[in-house]
Amino acid sequence: MPPVARYGLEQARNQLPAIAASAHAGTSSIITRHGKPFAAVVPLEAMRGSQAAPGILVLRGMGKGLWGPDAAKTINKLRDEWGEA
């Protein structure tokens, strides 16, 4: 793993072109605020490798409980409601 440079927020602001050039060359940098990690400047390849396209499975369970304990009964009730006129 390549070394990670650390910069304070003000220092990073003043040296942004050099930090960007380092990232382009493959070196990551951590920007700190009050001594705590605040942001990271990483090579583009590192970012691309960490972001997988989300699949449909991320939606699994999103509608749980939406139709009550018996979804079929709730849907039939809604259909009947629209059928009465």
Image: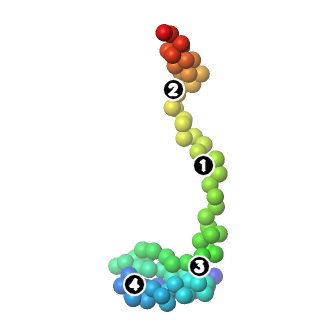
- Asked if 24 appears above or below 74 in the picture, the reply is below
Q: CA distance from mark 1 to mark 4?
A: 37 Å
Q: Is residue 85 left or right of residue 52?
A: left
Tell which circle, 3 or 4, labels the residue nearer the N-terminal end.
4
Residue type for callout 2: Gly
Q: Which mark is residue 68?
A: 2
Query: Residue at coordinates 50% horizontally, 15% vertically from top-left?
Result: 81
Crowding near pointer 4: few (<14 within 10 Å), some, many (20+)?
Answer: few
- Residue type at the position of mark 1: Val
Residue 31 position, x and y percent, is: 44, 80
Mark whose residue sits in front, 1 or 4? 4
The kind of residue tagged 3 is Pro
> In this rendering, does residue 50 appear at all?
yes
Picture quarter with the N terminus: bottom right
Q: Is residue 35 visible?
A: no
Q: Nearer the viewer, residue 11 or 24?
A: 24
Indicate which disc residue 72 carries. Answer: none
Instruction: Identify the residue under disc 4.
Output: 13
Of badges 2 and 4, the one in the foreground is 4
> Is 54 left or right of 39, judged from the image as shown?
right
- Tell me the element at label 4: helix
